[in-house]
Image (spheres, rainbow, N blue to C red):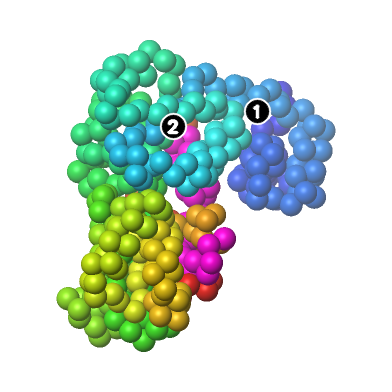
Amino acid sequence: MGITAKELAARLGLSATAVSMALNNKPGVSADTRALVLKEAEKNGYDFSRLSMKKNHSGDIYCIIYRAHNAILNYIPIFSELTDGIEEECRHNGYHLKILQIYEKTDDLQKCVEDLRVSGCVGIVLLGTEATVSICRSFLQLSIPMVMIDSYFATVDCSCVLINNMQGAYLATSYLISRCQKQPGHLCSSYRIENFAERTAGFTKAVREHGMSVGKSISHELSPSIEGAFADMLEIIDRGDTLAECYFADNDLIAIGAIKALKLRGYKIPDNIAVIGFDNISESRIIDPSLTTIDIPRKFMGQTAACQLIKQLAYPVPHTVKIEVSTTLVKRFSA
């Protein structure tokens, strides 16, 4: 009988985790250690067929994108990075990923759920940006392991991976105040989701902690798209509404649309009005001036969600988890 991974670890004076990483070709050990483990395993008759058996999973993991409103999920690059991370982690662990988009206005949700029941689906990553509690529960009724990404419901027993929106907005607003030494305004989305509510809370916290009154912050509601925010901001300017000298925007699409409108009406960014966004989309780098914003590690979020799901598939999970991924400030020239 060949050597086991546990015996191999003891013989080489390595941890069981290090040996497992080496045998499964996972990152976390050096090339020399990997080579040593493989050589010793071959020498002592390790059964490598165990590894291939682990990789030959049956069934598919589904990434379900629930779309209730095109204004948020219509910007594809943001969510393609998430799905890239999910797909990479699934492939690395021998699972095949299928992507299913469900449109609230045109698709029969219950039929979609029933189709999943007979589809060979073994796990679900639900993109919950626009989902509600009832939508989440509809998928949980399948009794299939599920992890939700980009949303969290305190009343639903489901593991989730989401952005630390409050931390990001607090970081952005604090930076804006320190740079401008002015009362910051808020360019908020006219379409409200939980992510934006959390960003508002972060904005409010930063304003208060800098000794300012939240009531004195000028707020404008803009559509959460470049074209919509551009049109809305033009209307605000042309109406003669009072403008702030610096703004935190709920997302980059709003920030970019507002900057385009301000520039069209003769305002200089950031000399007259500074603007900071949230999301670090590709357009934020090419707009003039380039947009100071909050970066979200979207691919890492996808990988983390898939990793949590795969753990649920491998082992019974007694407790669900809520994982918040931190954000970072990207300093450019709009603020």
The mark nearer the N terminus, 1 or 2, is 1
The percent coordinates of residue 254 (x first, y second) are: 37, 58
Disc assigned to residue 51: 1
Label 2 sits on what residue type? Cys
Residue reaching furthest to the top:
118
Q: Is residue 70 visible?
A: yes
Task: Work out whether 258 lies above or below 301.
Answer: below
Instruction: Please name the residue shown 28% across and 75% down the image.
Output: 243
Q: Residue at x 24, y 39 (%)?
A: 132
The picture places residue 47, in percent across and down from the top left corner, at: 71, 25
Instruction: Reply yes or no: does residue 162 show up in magenta.
Output: no
Q: Residue at x 76, y 35 (%)?
A: 41
Q: Residues within 10 Å of mark 2 (few under 14, many from 20)?
A: many
Which amino acid lies under the numbered mark 1 shown in the image of this protein? Leu
Percent position (x, y) of residue 101?
Answer: 40, 29
> 17 left or right of 219?
right
Q: Check if residue 289 falls in the magenta segment.
A: yes
* Dot label at residue 329: none
Q: Are marks 1 and 2 in contact (CB under 8 Å)?
A: no
Q: Which residues are magenta?
A: 286-310
Instruction: Tell whether 84 sits left or right of 273.
Output: right
Badge 2 marks a residue whose secondary structure is strand
In terms of depth relative to the viewer, which is nearer, 39 or 132? 132
Q: Position of residue 169 (x, y in %)?
A: 36, 66
Q: Nearer the viewer, residue 283 or 260?
A: 260
Name the residue beneath numbered marker 2: 63
Figure quadrant of residue 106? top left
